[in-house]
Amino acid sequence: MREWFHNNTRNFSGSRAGAVLKIKGKPKMLQDWQAYQALTYEEKWKSHVDKEWEAYKTEWEVEHPDEKRPPKNRFQIMVEFMKDKYKNETDEMKARCEEYRQARKASPAESASEAERNLQWQL
């Protein structure tokens, strides 16, 4: 604790004072199922995932009445569901997902207003 307090409360001087590194990494390529989720989840699969999550949760609660939480959360159920649906999708949709992945990697998703807001925090 003493070392943390000493290292985090002292004033910086010299070349490090007020320095902000502006490192912009390359945008990561989405996985194929993530692109599929981005294109179809809200209008097509959200209600199905909600139903599957509720069914999983109630089934688990019946089998394990003494435990508080199931081992999987809703996000894990959604990921499994989307991966399964993507595997069974048509080649046309898979090509559309690949185009989406490439387009997203080529242009960062950060908007100008976000960039301006982040710049204000850095100053």
Image (cartoon, helix red, strand yellow):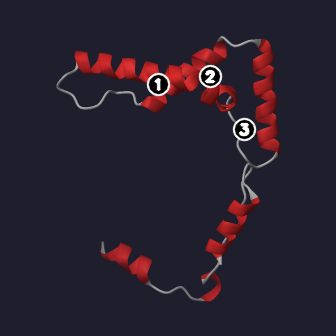
Q: Are marks 2 and 3 in contact (CB under 8 Å)?
A: no
Is residue 9 shown above or below 49?
A: below
Pinpoint residue 74: horizontal percent, then vertical percent.
44, 30
Pinpoint residue 23: horizontal percent, then vertical percent.
71, 62
State the CA–CA distance, disc 1 to disc 3: 27 Å
Left or right: where 48 falls relative to 19: left
Residue 31 or residue 42, whichever sits in front? 42
Which residue is at a point 66% across and 67% down the rendered structure image? 117
State the CA–CA distance, disc 2 to disc 1: 12 Å
Instruction: Determine which quarter of the picture holds residue 51.
Output: top left
- Residue receiving disc 1: 50
State the CA–CA distance, disc 2 to disc 3: 23 Å
Which residue is at a point 65% across and 84% down the rendered structure image? 15
The kind of secondary structure element at disc 1 is: helix
In this view, the mark in front (1 or 3)? 1
Left or right: where 71 falls relative to 14: left
- Residue receiving disc 3: 29
- Residue receiving disc 2: 44
Q: Amino acid at mark 1?
A: Asp
The kind of secondary structure element at disc 2 is: helix
Instruction: Determine which quarter of the picture holds residue 82.
Output: top right
The kind of secondary structure element at disc 3 is: loop
Image quarter hosting the N terminus:
bottom left
Pinpoint residue 60: horizontal percent, then vertical percent.
30, 19
Q: Amino acid at mark 2?
A: Lys
